[in-house]
Amino acid sequence: MKTLFHFAFLTTLIFSCSPKIGSTITSKQTPLSDTDFVLVLQQQDDFINDGIEIGSIKSGDNGLSTNCTYFEVVDRLKQLARQNGANVIKITEHKMPDRWSSCERLTAKIYRVPNFRKHEKEIEWTANRKLTWEDFKGSPKIISNSNTAAQTYCGFGFQTNYVTILTKAKIFTKNTFTCNLSWVRPDQKDKADLLEHEQGHFDLCEVYTRQLRKKLEEKKLTVLNLNADANIIFKDVYALYLDRQELYEKETNHGVNRQKQIEWTEMMSAELNDLSSYAK
C-alpha cells in the first residue's frame, strides 16, 4: 500500500546571491571521499548523537550574486562536512529569503556517527539504494476493513532558484521516501515479495520525478512564464502519477499477484532506463 504527497515551491525575485561558507571545527576527523553520503537533518528532526560532534558550519549572504538556493547551499555544506570527516549535518537555524537577503541561510552542527542510516528521516531515491524493512520506521496503523501489511509514504516535487530577466531558471526536483510515516507489520518483515512491492511504489515515484524533470526542462521556463507554466506541468504529471499508482495496486493486487508484480517490476525498470538522461 502507498500514501502519496507532493510539494512545489516557486519564487521570483529581482536578485540572488552566492553563499558565504564558514566553520568552527573542534574535533576534525579523517576526511570522507567526495562521493561519501552525508545525511542532512532538519531543525525539527530529532537527533541523539551517538558519535563525535565535530563542530559547526554556516552559510550566509555573500552579496548580490547567484547560486544560493537551499539545494545549492546544502551541497556546499556537505562538501565542507566531508572535508572535516562528518557524515551528519544537523541544521539548527534556517533563514528563508527576506527583505534583507535573497539567499537561504543555514547554520548547522556536524557529526561523525557509526551508522547514519539509523538517524534517517527520509530517503532520496538512488539506483544503488534499495529499501529495507529497517527504513520503515513508522508505527503500524489499524485500517478499518483492511489487511494492509505495509505502507510506503513517498512523493515528489520541485523548487526553483530566484529567477530574474537576466538569469536562467534552475529546476530542483526531489523524490523522497519518508521513514517515520512508512510502516510494516512486524509479522510481515520476512516477506521479500512484499518489500519488492513497496520498492515498486518508490520506483514509480522516480519514474514520474524524471518525467517532471523532463517536461520542466523542455518548457524553457523564464521569469515571465515560471509560476503559471511550471505549476500546470506539475499538476498534469502528478495526476498521471496518482492514476498509475492506483493501477499498480489494482493489477498486482497489492503485490499478491506474483506474475503481475514481476511484469510491473520489469516495466518500471525499463521506464527508468528510458529516462536515464533525466536522472538526478
Image (tube, grey):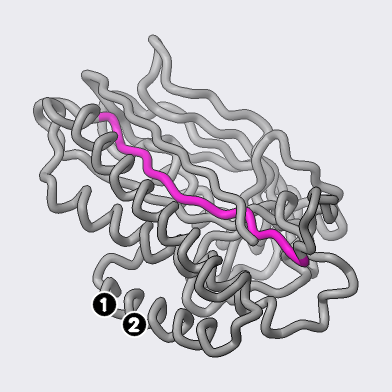
Taking the magenta stretch, the answer to whether it contains residue 184 is no
Q: Which quadrant holds the N terminus? A: bottom right
Q: Which quadrant holds the C terminus? A: bottom left
The three-letter amino acid code for the residue at tag 1 is Asp
* Residue 270: image tag: 2
| Vertical comparison of 161 with 138: above or below | above
Disc 1 is placed on an element classified as helix
In the image, farthest residue toward the front:
145
In the image shown, does 7 or 49 lie closer to the viewer? Answer: 7
Write down the region rendered in magenta.
Answer: 149-162
The secondary structure that most of the magenta stretch takes on is strand
**What is the x, y in percent for residue 53?**
78, 51
Q: Which residue is mark 1?
A: 274
**What is the x, y in percent for residue 121?**
69, 52
Q: Residue at x 74, y 64 (%)?
A: 150
The three-letter amino acid code for the residue at tag 2 is Ala
